[in-house]
Image: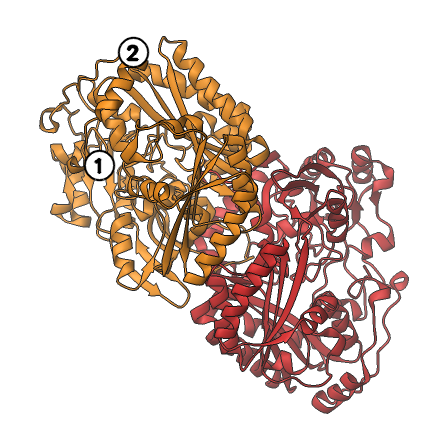
Chain colours: A orange, B red
Amino acid sequence: MVWDAWGIPAGHRSLPERIRTLLTQVFGVSGNPVARRDEGEVPLRESTLTPTQRAGLVELVGAANVSADHLDRLRHAGGKSTPDLLRRRAEGAQDAPDAVVFPADHDEVLAVLAYCAEHAVAVVPFGGGTSVVGGVEPVRGRFDTVIALDLRRLDRVTDIDPISGTATLGAGLTGPRAERLLAAHGLSLGHFPQSFEFATIGGFAATRSSGQASAGYGRFDDMVQRLKIAAPTGSLELGRAPASAAGPDLRELFVGSEGTLGVITEVTLRVHPIPETVAYQAWSFADFETGSAALRAVVQAGAAPTVLRLSDEVETGINLARSGDIGGNSVAGCLAVTTYEGSVAHVAARNAEAGGLLAAAGGTPLGEKPAQEWERGRFAAPYLRDALLDVGVLCETLETATTWANLTALKAKVTAALTDALSGQGTPALVMCHISHTYPTGASLYFTVVAKQLDDPLAQWLIAKRAAGDAIIAAGGTITHHHAIGTDHRAWLPDEVGDIGVRVLRAVQAELDPTGILNPGKLLP
Amino acid sequence: MVWDAWGIPAGHRSLPERIRTLLTQVFGVSGNPVARRDEGEVPLRESTLTPTQRAGLVELVGAANVSADHLDRLRHAGGKSTPDLLRRRAEGAQDAPDAVVFPADHDEVLAVLAYCAEHAVAVVPFGGGTSVVGGVEPVRGRFDTVIALDLRRLDRVTDIDPISGTATLGAGLTGPRAERLLAAHGLSLGHFPQSFEFATIGGFAATRSSGQASAGYGRFDDMVQRLKIAAPTGSLELGRAPASAAGPDLRELFVGSEGTLGVITEVTLRVHPIPETVAYQAWSFADFETGSAALRAVVQAGAAPTVLRLSDEVETGINLARSGDIGGNSVAGCLAVTTYEGSVAHVAARNAEAGGLLAAAGGTPLGEKPAQEWERGRFAAPYLRDALLDVGVLCETLETATTWANLTALKAKVTAALTDALSGQGTPALVMCHISHTYPTGASLYFTVVAKQLDDPLAQWLIAKRAAGDAIIAAGGTITHHHAIGTDHRAWLPDEVGDIGVRVLRAVQAELDPTGILNPGKLLP
């Protein structure tokens, strides 16, 4: 990925004229792109990797797989949150890991961790580098040296079981590469978060990722059957059966552990045959409350589509769900998108049952086209954020989840917190929201915030982010539904698990990583 | 419950004549019931509870709620495995907790745990006492005194959210009582394990119970939204949202912790409206392999019924799935039972889709009746075991789970291990099996074993159990799908989670229960 923006250069795009006009009207920004720094010329802090450390690591993984090169370090300098990108666009030296190590397999990961534990080197496990919560920041903690442990070479499918519908995938496989390898066997994983094109299997597991087809295929944590983990004190393999009552489920300690308890090297996942057919159906609802009640009816009836989403009035109004037409003709009400995957019989039955419930709950069918448009543009939003940042507009997202009964109240409180925090600093804010993940007992809320960049946009956003996080906790939501904790949500972890919960996590960490080399400064407050 | 058998006296029944005949033919047993001991006359080890300890506990929960009475101690003497019952039928003194304490609420549980930690008293959390793996044995460990902590007074519904479909239930509520309280709100939990009539909400959570409607409503662990836990070092409340990416899911440490990490005092669960309608449909398959492939097709298509079960040829042949007709007219092939719950539209759609798949996979529809018969008798099997034990027949169950691809091989190996271990000791064995819990990637296997009791039936069974457990692990199954670890499966826990996994669990235990008072001798090897 580009070091100071999302994705690849070919994905970048400039803002449509109508959006520039809108931005000028609402925020008074000029709309002229500002220059960015060339990656070859960005000053980096000097690497502290000693010749002895380099030699020690080279012995484990080979000379070609230990790099302290400028570009390798720069490209492992962190994730892709708006604060990350704002920091990279600022003047001055960029922090970066002191070296990047590319192990070939589980045993090399294990050896590198043992070496680093013995020689006091911090380790940041690195997959696609798409974290938006500071999960891969090169934090040294109490150590002089920090390496990024890039897992891209763990990129094999080591087992396929088409009868049971499972596949064992290397942690370093990206979403598209995993899908291509599975497709050769007629199978699909069906995990499509917005980071799909760059993020990795190990990263999905380590952060409790949730994909856009979660209504049909579940969250990534639901898909995990078995994990292989390398820790400084040894290896674990967890998950013997589709379900078990053999004590606590230790997989659930490592799923979501964000590289702080061990490095996930291999994941056995539930997969499914490539669907025979896909049906698309968009719906319109008068307002968000009507729409969310309709989604609830469908999910609670056990009739969930594969994709089930609802944009609020603001997001629907600017067509954010239909990226080809953002800022185009304004649409009233709230747009919902459904897709159905599976056999012809299953798709027909499910579409009929869910459609009946959505219509009964006040939905107006809009046909296939808006749902297909949503699917076409579904990975494009982060590129749009780059174009907005370029012209002096602040754009960031945050997300939460709560019960159905609490959903509208939580949405209102977070929206108010964001709006107040930004207007209090002198800029109006546009706050949009959608539901993209649904459960029988509740749903996620995903907010997109757009405002004018003030003099110090980083500080400006951190004030808004703090206000939103506090509002989420005060209103009973979770601090993150699928973005993880990283550095950015650490302050709220005690609100999630309590002080004793934090102590339990520290006890587990002390057992697995006694010297504390693993991803310092992440997850635990 | 009766101290030395399952359930209540009204449930007990004698064996039908045709079964006595069968038993005489196959095992050569006489069929005459043997006398059992009167509970008032069973000698108990002297209680070691000191007057000081009694006074300390009385101060916390009141004099009426600390008992060292003979009958209270006897009725908390352990669970309901066949070894438990065989031990109770033997001569000699019966082990029992030194006292039984009945706290009123979470705070009293917390206070009792703090007291016991300070005064070196072991604590066995006690729900319905239905464990079949030694989970509530009065093991003292390194302590002189052990109490049973009976949670029956934690029996309230403290919150109902019909919009979100959640209910917060006290840990001491039994299955039927929870269903009655929910029914007053038009709601149902839908968790119906064989222990349903006596087991409790807290016990279901602590042991990862799975009910007969798991295909529709999920395992008990799937239903858990939030847990409240009392530990010697303090309280935890875990689960802020229907789904979260806020780090490791610590709920999954306590679900399945079997009272070794804390006492679950309150559980918020997913519930659903009492179904509008229920449809029943039984099926016949030529053999187990055809039937299990049919179940797999249904589950992998996302078309699972609410109940989905398949008996193998032996179980079908003696009609064990239809308790009103056990040993009656023999039926060929393999019987499958399906039920469908929900709205009229949902039931019709799902029945049509699943029925189509079952028929396409070789199923012959048998109509409603066999499925209704199964439902009527579904809690009766443990009473049948008592009647068998009474006449000198050994009867016990054990269970596992594995992937679909491994199911037939695992079944054959466990059957062979049981048959060989019993025939090697001089008795033929009847080994039956059914699938009662299905997942997209695999299913459970539940074995019922019947043999002649030899001179030392306890030792006889332990040899067979050891052989079966070793065969399960060697063949890639889990040592328990829904019975938990307790004392009986401890030796195999390292096979499930590895040595490092065991160390992680010990580290968590040391943090929450530094003096080790909680349920000694359970879960951890």
Horizontal relation, residue B221 to residue A486: left or right: right
Report, in whole angstroms, how far the alpha carbon at label 1 lies from the one at label 2.
26 Å
**Which of the two residues, A390 or A350, is positioned nearer the viewer here?**
A350
Residue at mark 2: chain: A
As drawn, is A378 to the left or to the right of B183? Answer: left
Work out whether residue A144 or residue B415 is closer to the camera in this orientation and state it.
Answer: B415
Residue A363 at x, y = what percent?
Answer: 50, 39
Figure check: A492 above or below B463: above
Label 2: which residue? Answer: A454
Which of the 4 quarters of the picture holds residue B171?
Answer: top right
Q: Name the residue under label 1.
A: A7
Residue A196, by quadrant, is top left
Q: In the rendered structure, which amino acid carries the disc numbered 1?
A: Gly
Whole-percent x, y for residue B449 in the image: 64, 76
Up-down relation of residue B140 to residue A55 (above or below): below
Seen from the viewer's position, the closer of residues A123 and B177 is B177
| Left or right: B116, with A325 as reference point | right
Q: Quadrant of the N terminus of chain B?
A: bottom right
* Pointer 1 chain: A
- Crowding at dot 2, Cα within 10 Å, few <14 / some 14-19 / many 20+, comes out as some
